[in-house]
């Protein structure tokens, strides 16, 4: 079975974090997704579609235990906090 772009996003930009006190919330996870899409040249899906596809991938966007990683994480952080530098 082919890997969906949502599965590829999870593989490229997230990692499980069972021991973290601050996992990604729904807004941050979607923001990370949009950063990943920008880097991949893919048009992001609407938030409702994103949430539905995350459920199909086994991710609860409200209670998920994920951390960000990779290029999309750097892009998301820099675009979210441009004045932190």
Image (cartoon, rainbow, N blue to C red):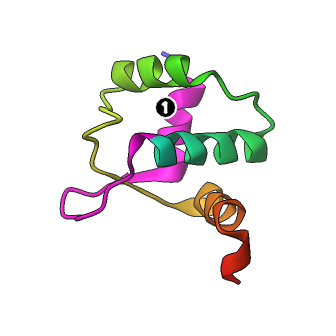
Residue at image point 55% right, 36% down: 8
Task: Describe the element under mark 1 as helix, strand or loop.
Answer: helix
In this rendering, position of residue 19 left or right of residue 49: left
Q: Position of residue 47 (x, y in %)?
A: 55, 25
The reply, left or right, for residue 11 in relation to residue 33 is left
Q: Position of residue 24 (x, y in %)?
A: 39, 52
Question: At 38% from the left edge and 54% from the top edge, which residue is drawn?
Answer: 15
Q: Which residue corresponds to mark 1?
A: 7
On-image quarter of the C terminus:
bottom right
- Extreme bottom residue here? 85
Residue 72 falls left or right of residue 28: right
- Residue pictured at 25% horizontal, 40% vertical: 63
Q: Which residue range is magenta in the image?
A: 2-26
Please, is residue 58 above or below residue 62 in the view?
above
Expressed as whole percent of the image width and height from the top left, the position of residue 53 reads 46, 20
Q: Is residue 2 visible?
A: no
Label 1 Cα crowd, 10 Å radius (few <14 / some 14-19 / many 20+) = some
């Amino acid at each position: 079975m082919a890997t969906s772009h949502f599965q590829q996003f999870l593989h490229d930009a997230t990692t499980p974090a069972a021991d973290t006190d601050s996992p990604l919330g729904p807004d941050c996870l979607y923001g990370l997704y949009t950063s990943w899409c920008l880097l991949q040249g893919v048009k992001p899906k609407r938030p409702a579609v994103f949430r539905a596809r995350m459920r199909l991938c086994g991710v609860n966007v409200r209670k998920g235990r994920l951390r960000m990683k990779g290029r999309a994480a750097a892009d998301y952080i820099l675009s979210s906090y441009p004045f932190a530098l």
